[in-house]
Amino acid sequence: MRSRIPTLQIFVTSIFILSILFILSILYGPVYIDPLRILRDILGQNSLTESEEVIIYSRRIPASLGALTSGALLGISGLLYQILLRNPMGDPYILGVASISYTSLIAFAYIAISLGSFFYYMSLVAPIFVLIIALIYTFILSIISMRLSILQLLIVGVSIGFASSGASLILLSRLPPDVAGYLYIALMGSFEPVDLRAAETLLVSLAVVLVASLVLSIKHLDPLILGDDYARSLGVNVNIIRLLISLISGCSAAITVAYVGVIGFIGFASPHIARILTGSGKSIIIAPLTCIIGGSIALLTGLIAKTLLQGAPLTAVTSLFGAPLLIYMVSRMRGEYSW
Amino acid sequence: MVMDGERCVDVLSLVSGYGRRIIVRATARFCRGLSCILGPNGAGKTTLLKTLAGLLGPLAGFISFEGRDIYSYSIRERARIVAIHLSSIPSLPLLKVRDVISLGRTPNMGLTLSGEDIRAISEAMKMTNIEDLSDRYFNQLSDGEKRRVMIAMTIARKPRVLILDEPTSFLDPFNRYYIFDIIRRIADEIPVIVSTHDIDNALRFCDKLYYIVDGELREASGFREIGEIYGNMVLDPFTLTLEPKLCNSDKSIHLISGCGTGVIYIRKYRPKNSITAGPLYPNDLDTMVLNRLGAKIITTLEPSPVDDTLKMIYNAIKLVVIDVPSYCRPQESITVVRRAIEMGKEVILIDPKSLWLDLK
């Protein structure tokens, strides 16, 4: 990959692709509605029936926004973890947020059963419960992380992940089969349950996370790549920055898990795709591009999951379609992409 | 060396280490010029340098620059004053050389690189001669190039004190010399403190030599001390190499050599016996170096060099004669060899070429 496409061109193209995917994901869904009629209605000519309007405005648009924002959040979270842990395997769930969320969701199922109306509590209260637990976990882990080396943090996080997966399996096996089946589906990850309010929350979180990580990427992320000692000698308060990174990436992961479930691969792959496309490791370039790419992958896989492969778990689709792409891109690099 | 009373790093009763573990104590004054710190692995060079650079809080004592405690500055202010180059070279995925050096401006720059930042970056690249590498990926450079880039990164902020921890490790001899040459030029402007195992370059370039022994920083006053830092070694002041001390046994080998061939012989064969040598000219390299390494030597200044040498040969288990040209050996050596053969001693004749030496 000697001759590179200019960075600006990559940004413009990727934003264009993102917009196209966003529009497509509004126009197409499990229920067929004539795309032209949808477009006309959105542009202000009342061309949809009432039930179609419900589908478009309270289902498809929030779900598409949900896909875009959670993809972007996962991307940035993965990027920040890769920088924080100095590890190309960095991923939003690497420090156990996903497993903790699983476990808390299953634990909440017990509470919901004991309270009586299981489905009411599961659909309304469970996401908030999971979010709170995941956020608390992130805060605790971030604060502990200031006293740990990177390797210690990685091993602690991964081990907690394993431990809580173990706990969740035991909890899951003691539940009645219908409840377990419901949880199994709830855990697989989907953009469809995202309603307008959830989309709003995700959008605000993305705005905050994006601004925060852009501010950090101006001066504070890249010195960290040099190592803690170099970063310190460059005047970076390493402990504070590591705390911030850990909080931002952990919260991004926690929020997406609470609203759309666990969706693998996006957070791991988007930063790599952004680096390979631009041929740059500078955070100020990679951070926004990772968001765009993460959003695009999420929209694309969401689109595939609701049209071509209806009912397939999102993670399966992202991995199935994303992995070959990433393998192809990496195989075209000639040694310049090394960690 | 020009002493500049104002711009010095003063280190006063410094105790440096981790937690309760004291690694090194130091009291010193580092002024403009190149100060080198020698010491075996694990002596505490890195610990001391990190403390001086403000990366590791001192357990006790003071470090001040221009009279002000360096730990009284904020992290960012201190970063503008003191810069450190660390011995390990990081992996910097997909960062280009220019990006890496720009990182060096972090403590100075605002939100974007100003004209002044860019000027400082190109000056640093010019000084380390890496302008051609500007667009290359850091991870694809050779070790020598990476070192120069990291040094450029460190000096891009125009520090007022520069600290380098083993800047020549992993480098070939030319690059080691080259890095010291760059450091030397920086040291003409500001105090530079370097830790190194590169004794020959330290002796070539440094204004002041320090060493750490028994957890204490000391200023070296001569060659003899420097050899002793590394255990049973002796520093050869002429070749700037460290040589192992000669064995001390009651069985000896007698050497007849000259023009420094004796030194090369023992370097190559590392004899397990003690060494005697002679007769030699008093100003021969062999006389000076073998003497320092602990050999007994007979020079032509002695009243009866032939007889004294023969006494030595009589006691020796072996006689090694290096076949040097006549200008390398005193006339007496011919007599000595002839008499030794008459005495029935076995003579081992060595061609200087077998010592990789071409004497003309």
Image (cartoon, coloured by chain):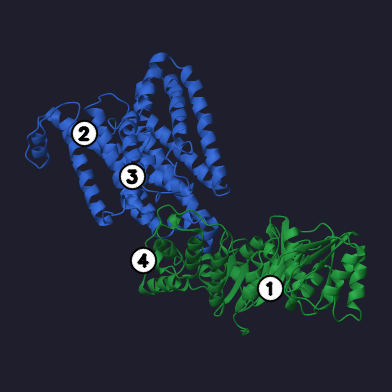
> Are the residues flagged by discs 1 and 3 in contact, CB closer than 8 Å?
no
Tell me the SS state at disc 1: strand
Tell me which corner region of the image, top left, top right, bottom left or bottom right, holds residue B200: bottom right
Q: Earlier in the sequence, mark 3 or mark 2?
A: 2
Three-letter residue code for mark 4: Thr
Q: Within the image, what quadrant is residue A311 found in? A: top left
Between A211 and B104, the one nearer to me in the picture: B104
Mark 1 to mark 4: distance in Å?
A: 41 Å
Few, some or many residues within 10 Å of mark 3 (<14, 14–19, 20+): few
Q: Is residue A275 above or below residue B189?
A: above
Query: Residue A273 location in percent, x, y?
Result: 33, 45
In front: label 4 or label 2: 4
Res. A60 mark: 2
Left/right of residue A131 with respect to residue B326 in the rendered view: left
Dot in front, 1 or 4:
1
What label does residue A332 carry, if any? 3
Q: Are marks 1 and 2 in contact (CB under 8 Å)?
A: no
Mark 1 sits on what residue? B209
| Residue indicated by mark 4 | B112
Q: Residue at x 77, y 80 (%)?
A: B283
Who comes first in sequence, dot 1 or dot 4?
Answer: 4
Chain under disc 4: B
Quarter holding the N terminus of chain B? bottom right
Pointers 4 and 2 in contact (C-beta within 8 Å): no
The green-coloured chain is labelled B
Q: Position of residue A21 (x, y in %)?
A: 21, 40
Q: Dot 1 falls on which chain?
A: B
- Give the residue type at disc 3: Arg
The image position of residue B348, as x and y in percent, is: 80, 61
